[in-house]
């Protein structure tokens, strides 16, 4: 079990440095100061880097705005579960509704000329291996939100 914010904050700083001068705006919001979850630190750093890169690539019209939020959430009516949640939202072109359920499957790539179809697949496998969930929501011409829920 680890501190989720201690992994997310350095990832955000890294991307702000990497894309400095490109008009990138990333905001980090947290409702809770102590959000703990089960994850592998090195893998989660790599996953966040890839998700943030995808968000930058999807935002083809400047300014590129990305919001990252970290919070603890409860779900379930009968059997309550507590999750550590990381949500990355971009202002990109969005994903077609018929394509959204297919993402996270092996070898499927959409909208990337050099994509291998392994990024979201390996992300989903890692997160599910930790007992978590990967959720994607999107609206065409508005943007996409990638949500990682980690078991607490």
Image (cartoon, rainbow, N blue to C red):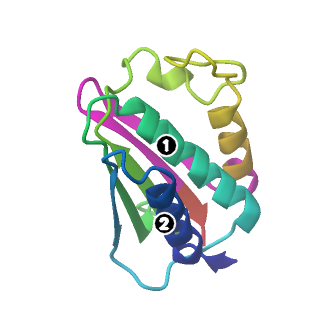
Residue at the (41%, 70%) spot, across then down: 71
Is 101 positioned to the left or the right of 77 in the image? Answer: right
Region rendered in magenta: 128-148
Residue at 24% from the left image edge and 25% from the top image edge: 141
For the N terminus, which image quadrant?
Answer: bottom right
Q: Is residue 25 left or right of residue 44?
A: left
Main SS of the magenta part reads strand
| Vertical relation: 1 (above or below) 147 | below
Q: Is there any visible trace of residue 40 in the rendered image?
A: no
Earlier sequence position, callout 1 versus callout 2: 2
Neighbourhood count class around disc 2 (C-alpha, 10 Å): few under 14, some 14–19, many 20 upward: few
Residue at 55 percent across and 70 percent down: it is 10
Residue 79, horizontal then vertical, whole percent = 52, 65
Which residue corresponds to the image point at 42% horizontal and 55% vertical from the top-left? 87
Under tag 2, what secondary structure? helix
Marks 1/2: CA–CA distance: 24 Å
- Who is closer to the viewer here, 128 or 69? 69
For label 1, the SS is: strand
Q: Residue 76 location in percent, x, y? A: 44, 60
* Residue 129 lies in the magenta stretch: yes
With 152 as the anchor, is 145 left or right in this view?
A: left
Q: Which residue is mark 1?
A: 135
The C terminus is located in which quarter? bottom right
Instruction: Residue lying at the far front in this picture: please name it.
Output: 21
Residue designated by label 2: 13
Closest to the observer, 20 or 95: 20
Residue 96 is situated, as x and y percent measured from the top left of the image, at 37, 17
User: 140 or 64: which is nearer to us?
Assistant: 64
């Amino acid at each position: 079990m680890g501190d989720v914010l201690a992994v997310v904050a350095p990832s955000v700083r890294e991307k702000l440095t990497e894309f400095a001068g490109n008009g990138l705006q990333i905001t980090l919001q947290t409702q809770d100061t102590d959000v703990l979850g089960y994850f592998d630190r090195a893998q989660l750093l790599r996953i966040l880097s890839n998700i943030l890169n995808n968000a930058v690539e999807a935002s083809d019209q400047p300014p590129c705005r990305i919001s990252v939020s970290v919070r603890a959430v409860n779900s379930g009516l009968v059997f309550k579960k507590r999750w550590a949640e990381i949500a990355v939202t971009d202002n990109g072109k969005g994903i077609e509704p018929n394509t959204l359920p297919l993402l996270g499957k092996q070898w499927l790539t959409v909208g990337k000329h050099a994509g291998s179809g392994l990024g979201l697949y390996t992300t989903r496998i890692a997160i599910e291996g930790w007992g978590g969930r990967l959720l994607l929501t999107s609206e065409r011409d508005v943007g996409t939100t990638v949500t990682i829920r980690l078991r607490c």
